[in-house]
Amino acid sequence: MQQPSKATATELFEGRKHYAVPAYQRPYVWNEEDQWAPLWEDIVRVSESHLGKEKPLPSHFLGAVVFEIIQASSAGITGLEVIDGQQRLTTLQLLLSATHRVLDAQGYSEHSERLEELILNKQSSYKGTQQRFKLWPSQANRVEFAHAMDTSEPKPQESSQIQGAYDFFRCEAIRWLAGEPDADGKKPPGDEAGRARELTETLAGRLVVVAIDLTGDDDAQLIFETLNDRGTPLLKADLIKNWVFRRGQKISADVDKWSRTIWEDFDTDWWREEIAQGRVTRSRVDIFLQYWLTMRLSDEVKQENVFRKFTEYAKPLMHDAGSAESFLAELRKDANTYRGFDSLTVDTPAGRFRKRVIEAMELAGTTPVFLWVISQNHHLPASQIEAGLAAIESWVIRRALMRETSKDMNKLVVAILKFLAGVPSDKAGVLIREFLSQQTADTRIWPSDAHLVSEVSKLKMYGSIKQGRLVEILRAVEEYKRAKDPKYGSVTLPPQLTIEHVMPQGWREHWNSVPSLSQDQQAERDKAVHRLGNLTLVTQSLNSSLSNRPWTDAESADLEDGGHPGCGKRSILDRFNLLVLNKEVVAQQKTWSEQNIADRGIELAKAIASIWQGPDASVQAAAQMKRAAG
């Protein structure tokens, strides 16, 4: 590697040079607020210092540019590959082109021609080729860039950041050269001719970069990893992309094809959008790659190790063009599956799992095994997808209701993945159920039917389990009850349902008995109101009407607050509710007491046990006996 050196635009672009940004590098992302406007302000500041009485500023530093010579010039052109700094170089070329045209239109041909020499290789042999441009950007920006640099090129259908940068610099150059005042009313010094001269001098000779030439045997990837463009930090995906495509070049693969068919989608806004993950936000593509590596390696991959783990895993799988293409095609298939998560419907096993486990139960950590089960690369039959996801979902729901910890979830996911690595795809789903049935550790045991039914009705649910999770569980019970009895018919449940206490939390206002309850009885009632048997679902508007009102109309004769004067909670539920959960309560109960809560809790627990089928009893018993024996 040559020693880093300072270089002006003239030194970077004069002569027959052609900087090529590899097709696979990320698209142009600089914008007006963060980069274009600050850069233009710096250019104006330097230029005006040479027009006034103050001490002239010799230069403005733009940052670093890293490149590698790929085609040395004798009488021809020097080809250089941009390793880092493509945002900077692309902006500089658009700035030079826009200013060149403004100067030409204003009749400053000498200055215009000086800048034109820095944006075009004008020799006839390069006419009609990409080599006529001093810079050729990444695949995603080539059509827009060509038009911005040469208006005879086809105009893109949609405006882009590339055109935005060109238009911004063109408008600013016109205003400044014309002497228009800035936002504070300050006019630029000098006359138009002087401003044209100093603007040309600044662009050609006073904007300075540190130029790093990697030509030789240096580790270009190591350099790439340590550099960031101004204001646009590299994602793990950017590092991986650079490594993948440089690897592709070494094995003579068709990297331009890879850019179009494998990686182009990863550079879109959807993948690069920042998503909250716990207390931090990360891009979707980085989150996916972390989950994908966990799935592939059957090992927990920390976010900070994603790049290293990917390269270690991928290198032996990309030993030639054919193997590399197969490997990347599998990555693309799984990425498409991941992107399709949002379109999964709840009438499919995958859609239900995503809605209930990943979203409602907030267990995104199950994504690697979820992705493994539904991956097109693993070819699981539909029956096995359903069986496998149902087993994991039941494990999650049952443990949540039993208020068991999920702190071991990530390790359990890895254990399942390791187990799946050696099983036939046509049995994978049922074997997941068997694997979970064999777990005996307290952090992993799958609650049995007997344990669930006997214990869950006694536990505090409301306040111990997030309301969104309880809503999802009770929605599933409602759907189960409705499907079980054809008289209810199939209806779409309202999207926004809330938890309602049948006996209200504020029961002391209208539910106090005569004679009054003892202190022990009051304490027991305070516990009972939060148990499963006392919880139901209603719409938000109905929830507000029910409030703390008494159960019967007779008890509500003098009640006017909350609307529906003289109506008890039971009659309001009967009149306005369509849910089976509430119809059963209204039809069967003339009163509502702690015993009713206990009885309904057991009934709901049995329904839950039917919806989310538990472990294989014989497998679980054998595993527990084995553990006890030794």
Image (cartoon, helix red, strand yellow):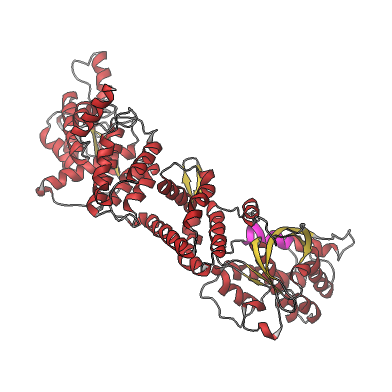
Identify the main secondary structure in magenta.
helix
Residue 434 appears in view: yes
Q: Quadrant of the C terminus?
A: top left
Question: Which residue is depicted at the point 60% across and 52% down?
Answer: 233
Q: Residue furthest bottom?
A: 124
138 to 569, vertically: above or below: below
Residue 408 lies in the magenta stretch: no
Q: Nearer the viewer, residue 163 or 292?
A: 292
Give the percent coordinates (x, y) of residue 534: 22, 31
222 to 77, vertically: above or below: above
- Image quadrant assignment for residue 497: top left
Answer left or right for 178 relative to 319. Answer: right
Give the percent coordinates (x, y) of residue 103: 75, 77
Q: Nearer the viewer, residue 586 or 130?
A: 130
Q: Quadrant of the N terminus?
A: bottom right
Residue 37 lies in the magenta stretch: yes
Answer left or right for 416 relative to 566. Answer: right
Q: Nearer the viewer, residue 60 or 548?
A: 60
Give the percent coordinates (x, y) of residue 357: 33, 43
Question: Which residue is depicted at the point 54% across and 51% down?
Answer: 236
Question: Which residue is depicted at the point 22% across and 51% down?
Answer: 383
112 to 242, vertically: above or below: below
Residue 557 appears in view: no
Answer left or right for 397 relative to 213. Answer: left
Give the percent coordinates (x, y) of residue 186: 78, 62
Range shown magenta? 31-41
- Image quadrant assignment for residue 442: top left
630 to 252, vertically: above or below: above
